[in-house]
Every structure is written in structure tokens, then in C-alpha cells.
Amino acid sequence: HQHPELSFKEVETPKYIANFYKDKDCKVETNVGQNGVKVTIDSGKPGKTLAIRADFDALPIKEETDLPYASKNEGVMHACGHDAHMSIGIELAKILSNNIDKLKGKIIFIFQPAEEGVRGAYSLMNNPIIDNFDYMAGMHIGMDLNSGEIGVGSHGFLATKKIDIIFKGKASHAGASPEKGHNALLAASSAVLNFNSLAQHSMGKARINVGKLNAGSGRNIVANRAKIEMEIRG
């Protein structure tokens, strides 16, 4: 938690994961799907191959908890719990490697970079390692369960799509001739208000959120450009 790293900028994190397994009864591969780590526990006995995925990137958020273990990287924080995912994956792999004589088949741990923005998952989808799994499981903490409970979710739970939309207008002097401009900021603002009227509640099956809006070049200029960054989930 103290050393978070942003998506595809993970350097020390995969090193830490790989070094953890140096003396364990398993095979470690690095730079999988760019910055990912693959840990293979092979029982040497015939059986299925199970893959377990844990992600490890953080978010560009300043931590303000004042906890003794708060982030030491300014402006970066494990605010989505991926440090917990790493901890679970590492400890589970250690337990299984210490009990390899009781296993059959293979268990493969995939420590995935860049979960935020879906890019890390995409990098793994285009990697031949996933073609050799019989089963693959992922996990996420904080799903509104009581302590000690585990939820088994369905395929595609909260699948997501990230979208950037560019609005192009026409600049004009806001005092001398505002009517000659085409205001991209107003167009983007109207779109944002309408997007947020479509999915307002967590009880529904869809989510729509505009998380960022940038527009204009000066206070006295009709904005000729605007950009919104949004996501949809379902």
C-alpha cells in the first residue's frame, strides 16, 4: 500500500512479486502482458490447469488518510484495493506451493498490470498464455459482503467500456461577437447532463459516468473545443 504505481508504470511492484517466489517451488516469468508476472505451480501429476488473476496497479489519487502505512508516492494511491488483491494472490500461491504434494495439474497465478482503464486485461487477452487454461478466476474486494463471506459472481460482472468524446466548435470573442462562435463547452455540458439522467442508481443494470470535462482556452473566448472522459458499465 505504501508504494503504489500507476498503470503500465509498474516497475518496483512486479519486481517485488517476482522476488517473493525465488525460494518457492514454482516457476516465475516476468514481463507478461507488458509488466505482468506469471507464477506456475506444477504438481507433476495429470489434471486440469486453473488460472487465478490478481491486479496490482493504483490510481492517480492523493491519499489523505494520515494512516501510518499511507502511500509514500505523492499523488498515487491504492484506492481500489489492488494492494489487497496482490496480498491475497501472493499468500494463496505461497500456501499452495508449500502443499504441492496434495495437488494435481497446474495452478497458474497471473499478476496483471493496468487494470484501471482495461488496458492490462487487453494485453493479456492477446497473450498466448491464456490459451492453456481450463479455468480462470478473478477477484475483487469490497463487494458489499460481510467480513468472512466470499461472493461467486457471474461472467462479465460490471463489464466496462471507456469512451473519450471530442466536441469541436468555433472560437469567437465572448464580448465583441459571441454569436459568431460555436460553443463546444455548452455542447459538452448538455451531453454530460443528459448522460447522467440515463443511469442514476446502483440498483439498475447500467452505469454511466462522466469523470472528466476539459474545455476552452480562456475566460473571454467562446470555447472551440471540449473533451469528456467517461465510462459505461453493465
Image (cartoon, helix red, strand yellow):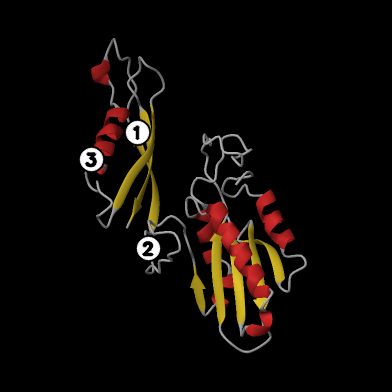
- Element carrying mark 2: loop
Q: Is residue 53 above or below residue 226?
A: below
**Left or right: where does residue 148 sit relative to residue 27?**
left
Q: What residue is shown at x 54% (from left), y 58% (from top)? A: 85
Mark 3 and mark 1: Cα distance apart in space:
19 Å
State the residue position of label 2: 157
Task: Between residue 79 and residue 157, name the one nearer to us.
Answer: 79
Quadrant of the rendered structure where residue 111 is? bottom right
Q: What residue is shown at x 64% (from left), y 66% (from top)? A: 38
Quadrant location, the C terminus: bottom left
Would you call the spot at circle 2 few (<14 residues within 10 Å), some (14-19), or many (20 or more)? few
Would you call the spot at circle 3 few (<14 residues within 10 Å), some (14-19), or many (20 or more)? few
Mark 3 and mark 2: Cα distance apart in space:
25 Å
Would you call the spot at circle 1 few (<14 residues within 10 Å), some (14-19), or many (20 or more)? some
Residue 6: x %, y % from top left: 58, 45
Mark 1 and mark 2: Cα distance apart in space:
35 Å
Give whichever of discs 3 and 1 has the lower sequence position.
1
Amino acid under disc 2: Phe
Amino acid under disc 3: Asn
Amino acid under disc 1: Lys
Report the disc number at residue 168. Answer: 1
- Which of pointers 1 and 2 indicates the residue nearer the eye? 2
Q: What residue is shown at x 28% (from left), y 10% (from top)? A: 176
State the residue position of label 3: 194
Residue 93: x %, y % from top left: 63, 69
